[in-house]
Amino acid sequence: MEFRILGALEVRAPDSTVLAVGGRRQQALLAFLVAHPGRIVSVPRLVDAIWDERPPATADRQVRNMVGLLRRLLGGGPGRVSPIRTDGPGYLFGGPEVRIDVQRFTALVDAAAQPGADRVARLREALALWRGPALDGLPGRALSAVAAGLEERRMTALERLYEAESAAGRDELAITELTELVVAFPLRDGLVRHLLTALARSGRHVEGLAVYRRYADRLAEELGLDPSPRLRALQGELLGAADGDRVGSGPAEPPARVPVPAPPPYPRPAQLPWDLPFFIGRAAQLAAMDRYLAGTGTPGTGGPGAAGPHRTSVLVITGIPGGGKSTLAVRWSHRAREHFPDGQLFADLHGWSPAGRQDPHAVLGAFLRALGVPAEDVPGRLDEAAALYRTTLAGRRVLIVLDNALDAEQVRPLLPGTGRCAVVVTSRDRLTGLVVREGAERIELADFSPAEGRALLHRVLGAERVAAHEHAVTRLLDACGHLPLAVGLAVVRLRDRPQHNLTGLAAELAAEGTRLDVLDEDGDGPSVRLRTVFALSYRALDEGAARLFRLLATSPAGDLSAPVAEVVGGQDAAGSARALRRLANSHLLTEHAAGRYRFHDLVRLFAAERGRDQESERSRDRARDRWYAWCLHQSAAATAPLLAPRRSRVPLPPPPEGLRTTAFDGAEEALRWYDGQRANLLATVGHAFEHRNDEVAWKLPALVWPYLHRSGRHAERLALGRTALAAARRLDDPLATGRTLNDQGHAWSTAGDLPRARRHYEQALDQVRAAGAPAVEGQVLANLGGFRFFSGDYAGAAEHFEDALRLLPADGPDADDWTVRLCEVSLASVHAFLGRFEAARARAERLLAPELGLHEGILGCSLRNVLGVAHYAAGRPDEALRHFARSLAVSRRTTGFPDQQANSLAGLAAAQQALGRPAAARRSWTAALDLYRQLPAHYRAPVTLLASLGFTPPDTDPPTAPFPTAPFPTAPLPTAPLPTAPLPTR
């Protein structure tokens, strides 16, 4: 399957058929995944890519729904497997059969750079992949940044192509193409330079001068800049050659000449440090810096608008320690230096250095001397030196690079006052003060993408050596956390030890306990040792933030927020929020969504080491136990509104003193909490089991299952159930084992494996009977009744439901109203499927009595469906329509029950057909069919029941994929129009 984003998004099936991807949001989601192949893209990042900073409250759920639609589209054909798969907190795109035009483009450009390659042929083949602007037609800030990076790579490839054409002596051929490109990209210095060179070598000097004049005029008008020295030198050559062409042609007025400026009467410092020879990636950030310099865009998340020709531009590059901030600043500065003919100043401010920060006054003295001010004329006071510095720079065009700044106060004296200078500042701090007061623009530097990490390996080690251990590349990059410094250390280690290979190093890095040791082994100084780099930021923290940093790493929580920090750190909510912001400002945490943070993997290892060194074992255990208790009690509070207030609960010990939990006002609020804490809860189950806290390891899944069921996360539920069952068996607790087997049986039923569900239920029944727990035995019997129902044994189902009702207590601590009502509702459904429609109607109407409170919940939805079937069977389609419509309204307001919605829609279609409304019946049936196709086969029996009563489903076009089985079998399918077995009991 082929995916193209070098132009408008296009997806081609293996037979070259173009697949139609849904609306703009689906296209944006797919495009963002395609642009990040092989890398986990979290749901919050996808939300940002689709909605920028204005996502709806249901954005996460909409993303999951869109992913489901895309999976069915991409994996729906013969022999096709969807390239989108769930991985941890997000989604991973890729696969052996996936071809992406960007990857092909990159491979061809890299091949062109190899010795002996046909550069022109490879580059032209690469550029032919472009069908228009990258991601054409897809809006949004995140996708615009991706597109900008791709366009920059295209421009670089074009410049390399015409450099190769010129070296091959094909200037005349290139002139036509370059002329068109310069019209399209009039301010691209490299393209103009190649066109001028081709015109000069072809003897077309006057045309060259005209091109130069148009470029110079536009550059001055739009940016307030003069052409670079290289272009001015080319202009001089063209002028001289043009004059020579005119000799002997008679008297003519000499053309106006633009003189090449004489060197200024003051020093032009060139202080930029060495540019890294194997710089990789960062195309989007480089393009963003170019745009801000040009005043045509705002790259980051900072303050006021763009820099004009008479305003100093200030760019702040910030990010995690070891993220490559200084390297990016130096690379861009070398690229841009031609725009600053009056010099480039550089200072390492040592803001995060063991030696202590540089004094701004000392830096000013060095800068002033470099700018030609005699040492004896440098004022002794900071304010006077800063004023002289601003005066000296007035009217000059100088680039100032301030590396490794501690804070805004250290930077402010070093900013020019007026003129056409630019300042690039790097810092681990966010330097919010510069953004607010000085209007600086901030660029946040993230980790390497997988493609950038691979490119570095190829560049340094060579493609052949990497290809020999391709299977280990992803493991090595993941172990490095894609942190540029860590990846660089690993690459240099392999380069310097040719007898070692990627597989061996990846295996060494797999062990978390020694990972930092391995990476730091070859660091030849503090600046290239990970522990030292992280420690510089850690030592700058106040004690509250430092202690929270240590304790957070002891808990399994990966998605950090103020409530999480309050539990683990023991501070109040406000103090916890402040400490998290402090950690994020120092880039020891990353804020991935508003108020939500996470560790980088390597920073978490460092924090855990600090915790072991500086926190007592008792302190670490207390933080972990508080976290376990909070997960249990807060999950119990969130589960209550998802089912019913009076139902059997998992027994929990009292919470620790001072532990604060929150009550939830309804199911939707509880579901939102679960959405936010899901990753933490799943990780906590695994952590508890690994540390042999089996009470937590079985009870937490037992509490979380209603959320996982209602949100459709059945694979996660099965995985948690296996862990919970292992923990319960390790405890040798028959009641815990029985409860867990009961839950796992329902999970298998929901997944469509009825035989496995039955085995779990029967084992659960043996365990709870051995434990002497009649109330729990009643819950298991209710689920066995659901199994019988799904198997088409309606009489056997009724027997189990009635047995369960005899065992379930009506009052006391074990009272379980939910399961009692569920059994009663299920018996109403049994009557309908046995053809006892009047008995079904009577029971349903009794259960819908207002005092029972079932009319608005999901059980009420089921009862309305039973009433609809009963009236339909009695020849009253108008009454049936009313009940099905009411059921549909309730089911649409209740998350997590698509089967009820499908059943309501099918009944609605039958009633509408009977009332002579074929168009409405077709719409209802099409909607029902789409939902049934997402469910296991045993959910479709209501269709058969309605068909036996005279309903003929309308002919419809298949929405995306055919039913796995015939939609209208002659024998009844094992299901019911209500959530009897789909809802487990306890």
Image (cartoon, rainbow, N blue to C red):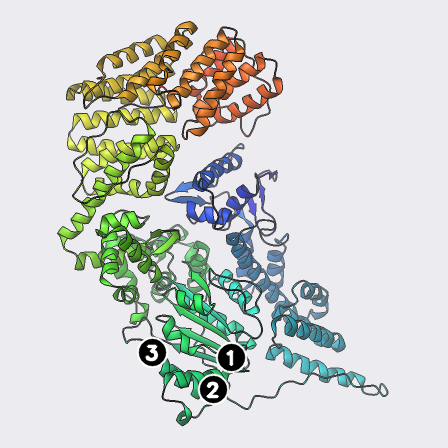
Residue at 34% over, 57% down: 480
Distance Cα–Cα, label 1 vs label 3: 21 Å
Label 2 neighbourhood size at 10 Å, few (<14), some (14-19), many (20+)?
many
Q: Is residue 239 above or below residue 599?
A: below
Residues 771 and 471: in front is 771
- Residue 193, by quadrant, is bottom right
Quadrant the C terminus occupies: top left
Q: Marks 2 and 1: in contact by CB < 8 Å?
A: yes
Q: Amino acid at mark 2?
A: Leu
Is residue 366 among what the camera can see? no
| Mark 1 / mark 3, whichever is N-terminal | 3
Residue tagged 1: 398
Rendered location of residue 334, percent (x, y):
50, 74
Q: Amino acid at mark 3?
A: Gln
* Res 732 label: none
Label 1 neighbourhood size at 10 Å, few (<14), some (14-19), many (20+)?
many
Q: Is residue 854 left or right of residue 332?
A: left
